[in-house]
Amino acid sequence: MPCSAVSPPAAAANAQTAVAHCLLVAAWHVLATRTPYHDLGGDYFLNRDNPDHHRRRAIAQLERLGYQVTLEPRAA
């Protein structure tokens, strides 16, 4: 069933279930590893971009497609 066909109350219930699942997973990790909870901060997903990671992943994707990749710095 497409998302547009879901009624608003059902969508709200799905969102509540997703949040509850995230909380349960976080609690499980804290209990399983016996480490205190460490909040990553509200801007975690904004600041986690790593240019080197993006570069390596793009190169790996192109190589899987059969390309030979050589990177050269762009002239300023």
Image (cartoon, rainbow, N blue to C red):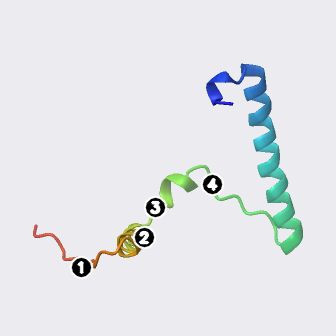
Q: Residue at x 36, y 73 (%)?
A: 59
- In the image, 62 versus 66, the foreground residue is 66
Q: How busy is the neighbourhood of tag 2: few (under 14 within 10 Å), some, or many (20 plus)? A: few
Which mark is drawn over residue 41?
4
Point out which mark residue 70 bears: 1
Query: Which quadrant of the structure image shows residue 53?
Result: bottom left
Image position of 50 with respect to 10: above or below: below
Number of the front mark, 1 or 3 = 1
Helix, strand or loop for disc 4: loop
Pick the residue in front: 24 or 68: 68
Q: Marks 4 and 1: in contact by CB < 8 Å?
A: no
Tell me which numbered mark, 1 or 3, is placed earlier along the sequence. Answer: 3
Q: State the quadrant of the C terminus.
A: bottom left
Mark with earlier residue (1, 4): 4
Q: Position of residue 17 (x, y in %)?
A: 81, 39
Q: Which mark is residue 57?
A: 2
Pinpoint residue 39: horizontal percent, then vertical percent.
Answer: 70, 58
Left-right relation of 17 to 55 = right
Across and down, in percent, residue 42 comes to: 61, 49
Task: State the residue position of label 3.
Answer: 49
Give the Cα distance between marks 1 and 2.
14 Å
